[in-house]
Amino acid sequence: MMDQEKIKQAVRLFLEGIGEDPGREGLAETPERIARMCEELYGGLEETAQTHLQKTFQAEEQGMVLEKDIVFYSTCEHHLLPFFGKAHIAYIPNGRVVGLSKLARTVEVYARRPQIQEQLTGQIADALMQELRPKGAMVMVEAEHMCMTMRGIKKPGSRTVTAAKRGCFLEEPELVHTFYAMLGCSR
């Protein structure tokens, strides 16, 4: 559980550390605002994907299920700056499917943590495999990182793309080709 008082104290110290006056009018309520914001931005630390993926439904169809363009916002654990983009999730059911909104909620569970994109991608794929027990899963994440845009190399518009394959997606290259084709990619 998040410690609101520690967050407020840390924000006050941070403001002092950069040479600001945490008591001035524009900043006086900032520690409280940041503490409330942390509940929202890092709420995934107190959630599990199992909560969202545990209720499944019988399905005779065994074709690929793809949910694409799931918008997410996360925070880079290296610089505590945002990264944001879209996640694309596919799985091959093994007799059971999950409600489509639950796939987007699974992305949120992992995105709402201090995170690196490579880990986020793998965590989503692993959660699908563990909870849904499909024949296979594939996840692709495309994101822009503020740590590359507003500091350091300063290259706005650059995107990082990561992919994770599990189960039959590792064994059947045609499934990977179908995944990219359904996304409209020529890979």
Image: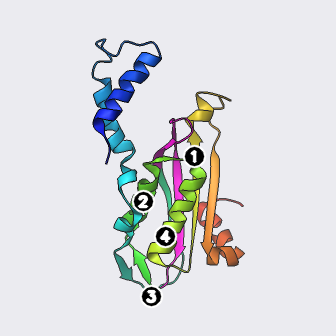
Residue 75 painted magenta: yes
- Region in magenta: 72-94
Q: Which residue is mark 1?
A: 143
Q: Are marks 4 and 3 in contact (CB under 8 Å)?
A: no
Please, what secondary structure does the residue beneath circle 1 have?
strand
Identify residue type, mark 2.
Ala
Task: Identify which residue, 113 or 158, lies in the foreground.
Answer: 113
Residue 104 is labelled as 2
Q: Which residue is mark 3?
A: 60
Q: Which residue is mark 4?
A: 128
Please, what secondary structure does the residue beneath circle 4 have?
helix
Residue 170 visible to an observer of this rendering:
yes
| Mark 1 or mark 4, whichever is nearer to me | 4
Q: Are marks 1 and 2 in contact (CB under 8 Å)?
A: no
Mark 2 → mark 4, Cα distance in angstroms:
12 Å
Identify residue type, mark 1.
Ala
The crowding category of the residue bearing disc 1, from other C-alpha atoms within 10 Å (few below 14, some 14 to 19, many at least 20), is: many
Identify residue type, mark 4.
Leu
